[in-house]
Amino acid sequence: MPENQPARTPRRWARSNRKGGRHRLGIHGRLHIGTPGRLRRNPQPVEADRLIEAAKLARKYPRARIIYTGGTSKLLGSDVREADYATQILETLGIPGSRIEIEREARNTAENATFGKLMASPKAGDHWLLITSASHMPRAIGLFCAAGFNVEAVPTGWRTTGHLDLFRLDGIADGLVLTGIATREWLGLIASRLFGDTGALLPGPCA
């Protein structure tokens, strides 16, 4: 899918909205974005696509419940949580803080799934969307499904435009960055499968 193509709302979710169904947005953490003040002393690469997409869907479906799950991957010495400033960004994008529920203790994707499910308490008839980066979606969807949290994928932040990118000669630096991202995700997929955290090397939609 082209990098600039917007994420699509799953059809089942849209159909359920027309029938008055219950809608839920789950925004998976690991956000990297530069923010001023005490929250971030050093700006980070911007990866705000998931929040922008969540804000768009939240405005489109004003009755949808919104959960952001994301703590910190640091084991010691950090009381700043991603969820704390993600809420500020969503409010800046026009989403009232009263609509946003935050889970701020998760340290990794597996905990995002487990803690997110506890907060969501999904019920029959709920339709949850998982919003996260396209590069991270296979591992995220596998861990959420394994945790018993049935979600539909809404990948954002596509980093390539297709197979033709393999033949580009003007993006060596970008290619190195993408290689690093891909390596991290593949190692994560392999580790998750070896440790039995997911049911497949390349997880698909929840059954």
Image (spheres, grey):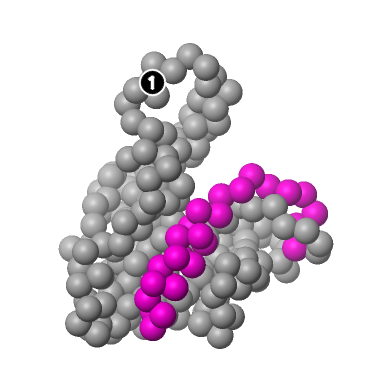
Report the number of discs: 1
User: Residue 174, located in which quarter of the rendered image?
Assistant: top right
Task: Please tell me which residue lies in front, 180 or 20.
Answer: 20
Asked if one can make out residue 197 in the rendered structure from this viewpoint, the answer is no
Residue 144 lies in the magenta-colored region: no
Q: Residues within 10 Å of mark 1 (few under 14, many from 20)?
A: few
- Asked whether, in this view, residue 23 is left or right of residue 72, the answer is left
Looking at the rendering, which quadrant does residue 17 occupy? Answer: bottom left
Residue 53 part of the magenta segment? yes
145 up-or-down from 183: above or below? below
Between 70 and 188, the residue placed more toward the observer is 70
Please name the residue shown 30% across and 62% down the image. Answer: 9
Q: Position of residue 119 (x, y in %)?
A: 45, 80
Which residue is at a point 24% across and 52% down the rendered structure image?
204
Above or below residue 25? Residue 163 is above
Q: Is residue 47 left or right of residue 62?
A: right
Quarter of the rendering occupied by the C terminus:
bottom left
Res. 138 visible in picture: yes
Residue depicted at x 51% and y 82%: 99
* Nearest the eye: 79 or 18: 18
Mark 1: amino acid:
Leu
Left or right placement of residue 62 versus residue 68 in this view:
left
| Residue 120 coordinates in the image, percent (x, y) | 40, 80
Q: Position of residue 13 (x, y in %)?
A: 25, 70
Q: Which quadrant would residue 165 be assigned to in this image?
A: top left
User: Which span is picked out in magenta?
Assistant: 39-64
Q: Regarding mark 1 in the picture, which secondary structure is present there?
A: helix
Residue bearing the label numbered 1:
166
Is 170 left, or right, of 46 in this rendering?
A: left
Quarter holding the N terminus is top left
